[in-house]
Image: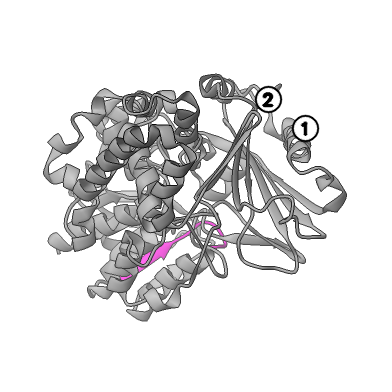
């Protein structure tokens, strides 16, 4: 039989690397197995010389007072990460209206108050409620305690009766102001009508408290730093190796088999892969749990996207000063959701435009719209057509853009699925929908006692959430060591 480790990871997303780093620091022998040539999942870049592109992640709340840096400090690597503040939390173009929400936490409330002075009382009440939820749920995490809603589920009771639209509408009467809050939905990929209130409320307020940042050198820097903790403590991170099966003995996972036919034994196994891939392809059917599989299958994967990476011959900052722009043809977010669900790309109704705040002699631009990897839709035949529609929409926002394009790379939902093995190319794991089932998602300890699930499938999308997931799993494992 092959090598023997204390903790074996299937996949090397940020959640797995966070978990592995804490386990390694605690003295466990950690092995990370990654099928791609690069670690980090969506947290990596690629090049088309001379251009370097962020593959997926562009913005994360990473203030020195925030949760991510709390974890990095605990690992002793906070000094190895340098962040750059984005120049806005987000910019929203809705029809002919344009708003730029500042990224500096000390400025956010006053910006809303001064921009919407007649709505000050409503805004104050909303922000106070958001702050209360943040303190109750996130506050304990900053002390390395379980999330507040897990120790006291009643904290969430009033939010579970709402979706994000109805929650905002319960405080804000001004339709224009409501739309500004709704406009942040691309950060989690679910439109307000179906979005989880707690997830979206905390999404907004975590940014309002901890800021909106980019990592110098790209988000792969975060993956590399976390991996360095693992290797510094005797662990091993291996790329270009695919786990083909997990074998159980006496009710526990005993070893992983790789495509090279190598076997990796372990005491604990942590899957950062899609739960559907886990039960459909890696675990023998006789070892699965029907209820757990049914719970996973009842959850909906978050949407994927068509992304266009543009390398430019000149900086476009004068035309697009904001680093984060959410553009909408109108405020009918419900209709946008329907088109996304139906893969209807006949109308360009939304566009996400992102650029890095890090100065570069080879400027780039990232364009994206949400899409699904549904069966029967031929993305190979259609992705370039959809990509051209994104560039055409961007041209209306940034006149003359096409004249400056020197490099174009297009990714479809199939592309995202191929490189990450996320089911359906999902960008955010299971969708952050408002129903109670989606709020709960799936447990981190699976139906096999020494097999754990981590990542956006458990907590929802975004680096903040997946790092919390990874740390929580590490604590569960260390309790059982």
In this rendering, the answer to whether 178 lies above or below 202 is above
Question: At which x and y percent is residue 93?
Answer: 61, 36
- Residue 474 versus residue 288: which sits nearer the camera? 474
Task: Using the image, tell me which numbered label, if any, was put on residue 385.
Answer: 1
Q: Which residues are magenta?
A: 29-38
Q: Is residue 271 visible?
A: yes
Chosen colour scheme: one colour
Question: At which x and y percent is residue 79?
Answer: 40, 78
Magenta stretch mostly in which secondary structure? loop
Q: Quadrant of residue 437?
A: top left
Q: Is residue 464 left or right of residue 389?
A: left
Determine which residue is flagged by label 2.
345
Mark before the other along the chain sequence, 1 or 2: 2
Q: Is residue 481 left or right of residue 436?
A: left
- Identity of the residue drawn at 84% across and 53% down: 404
Answer whether labels 1 and 2 touch (C-beta < 8 Å).
yes
In magenta stretch: residue 74? no
Question: At which x and y percent is residue 228?
Answer: 42, 75
């Amino acid at each position: 039989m092959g090598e023997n480790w204390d903790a074996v990871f299937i996949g090397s997303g940020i959640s797995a690397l966070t978990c592995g780093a804490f386990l390694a620091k605690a003295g466990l022998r950690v092995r990370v197995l990654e099928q791609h040539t690069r670690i980090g999942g969506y947290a990596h870049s690629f090049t088309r010389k001379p251009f370097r592109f962020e593959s997926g992640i562009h913005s994360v709340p990473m203030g020195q007072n925030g949760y991510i840096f709390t974890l990095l400090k605990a690992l002793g690597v906070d000094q190895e990460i340098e962040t750059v503040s984005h120049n806005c939390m987000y910019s929203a173009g809705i029809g002919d209206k344009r708003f730029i929400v500042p990224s500096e936490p000390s400025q956010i409330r006053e910006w809303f108050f001064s921009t919407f002075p007649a709505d000050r009382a409503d805004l104050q009440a909303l922000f106070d409620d958001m702050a209360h939820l943040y303190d109750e749920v996130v506050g304990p995490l900053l002390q390395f305690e379980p999330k507040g809603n897990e120790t006291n589920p009643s904290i969430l009771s009033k939010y579970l009766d709402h979706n994000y639209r109805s929650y905002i509408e319960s405080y804000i009467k001004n339709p224009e102001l409501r739309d500004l809050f709704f406009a942040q939905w691309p950060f989690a990929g679910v439109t307000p009508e179906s979005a989880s209130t707690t997830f979206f409320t905390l999404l907004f307020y975590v940014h309002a408290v901890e800021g909106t940042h980019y990592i110098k050198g790209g988000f792969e820097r975060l993956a590399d730093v976390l991996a360095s903790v693992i290797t510094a403590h005797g662990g091993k991170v291996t790329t270009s190796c695919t786990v083909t099966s997990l074998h159980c003995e006496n009710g526990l996972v005993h070893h992983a088999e790789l495509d090279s036919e190598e076997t990796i034994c372990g005491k604990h196994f942590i899957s950062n892969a899609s739960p559907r891939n886990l039960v459909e392809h890696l675990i023998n059917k006789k070892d699965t749990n029907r209820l757990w599989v049914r719970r996973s299958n009842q959850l909906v994967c978050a949407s994927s996207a068509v992304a266009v990476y543009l390398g430019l011959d000149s900086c476009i900052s004068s035309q697009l000063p904001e680093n984060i722009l959410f553009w909408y043809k109108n405020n009918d977010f419900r209709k946008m959701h329907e088109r996304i669900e139906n893969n209807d790309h006949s109308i360009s109704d939304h566009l996400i435009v992102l650029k890095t705040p890090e100065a570069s002699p080879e400027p780039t631009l990232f364009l994206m719209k949400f899409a699904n990897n549904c069966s029967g839709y031929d993305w190979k035949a259609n992705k370039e057509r959809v990509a051209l529609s994104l560039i055409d929409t961007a041209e209306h926002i940034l006149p003359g853009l096409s004249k400056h394009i020197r490099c174009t790379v297009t990714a479809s939902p199939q592309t995202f699925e191929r490189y990450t093995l996320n089911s359906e190319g999902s960008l955010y794991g299971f969708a952050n929908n408002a129903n109670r089932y989606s709020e709960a998602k799936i447990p981190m300890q699976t139906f096999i006692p020494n097999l754990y699930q981590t990542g956006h499938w458990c907590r929802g999308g975004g680096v903040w959430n997946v790092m919390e997931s990874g740390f929580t799993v590490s604590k569960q494992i260390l309790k059982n060591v």
